[in-house]
């Protein structure tokens, strides 16, 4: 059964991801960083069962990877 904490975490990460992608004047690198952070946050949340540390850690790692793409 999916807990309400897990649903809330995924919903928050998704909202942040969609909110950041709405910025049309972002550079390609900024956009990659935001997408990487959003995807990493969702993946970290899912892999750790919705823990806050997993979500934040995934967002950090995803953001760094997204920033370094096409460097």
Image (cartoon, rainbow, N blue to C red):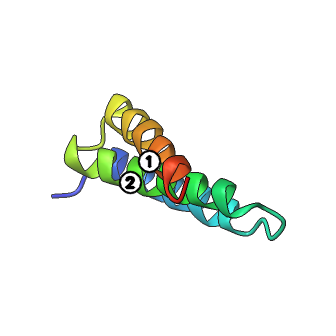
Q: Position of residue 27 (x, y in %)?
A: 75, 61
**Extreme front residue here?**
71
Furthest-left residue in this view: 1
**SS label for mark 1:** helix
Residue at the location (48% across, 58% down)?
11
Horizontal relation, residue 63 to residue 57: left or right: right
Q: Which mark is residue 3?
A: none
Q: Give me the residue at 48% from left, 54% from top.
A: 36
In the picture, the quarter occupied by the N terminus is bottom left
Q: Which residue is mark 1?
A: 65
Instruction: Give me the residue at 51% from left, 61% from top.
Output: 14
Q: Secondary structure at mark 2?
A: helix
Q: Pointer 1: residues within 10 angstroms few (<14), some, or many (20+)?
A: some
Q: Give the spatial CA distance, label 2 vs label 1.
A: 15 Å
Q: Position of residue 46 (x, y in %)?
A: 26, 51
Label 2 neighbour load within 10 Å: few <14, some 14-19, many 20+ = many
Q: Is residue 64 above or below residue 32?
A: above
Circle 2 residue: 42
Q: Is residue 56 left or right of residue 70?
A: left
**Mark 2 or mark 1, earlier in chain:** 2
The answer to whether the residue labelled 2 contacts the one labelled 1, judged by CB atoms less than 8 Å apart, is no
Q: Nearer the viewer, mark 2 or mark 1?
A: 1
Which residue occupies the foreground of this view, 52 or 17?
Answer: 17
Q: Nearer the viewer, residue 45 or 33?
A: 33
Position in image of residue 59 (x %, y %): 45, 42
Q: Is residue 66 above or below residue 28?
A: above
Residue 55 figure quarter: top left
Residue 63 located left or right of residue 30: left
């Amino acid at each position: 059964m999916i807990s309400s904490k897990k649903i809330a975490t995924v919903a928050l990460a998704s909202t942040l991801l969609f909110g950041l992608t709405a910025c049309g004047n972002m550079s390609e690198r900024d956009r990659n960083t935001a997408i990487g952070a959003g995807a990493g946050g969702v993946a970290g949340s899912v892999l750790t069962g919705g823990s806050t540390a997993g979500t934040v850690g995934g967002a950090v790692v995803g953001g760094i990877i997204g920033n370094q793409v096409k460097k």
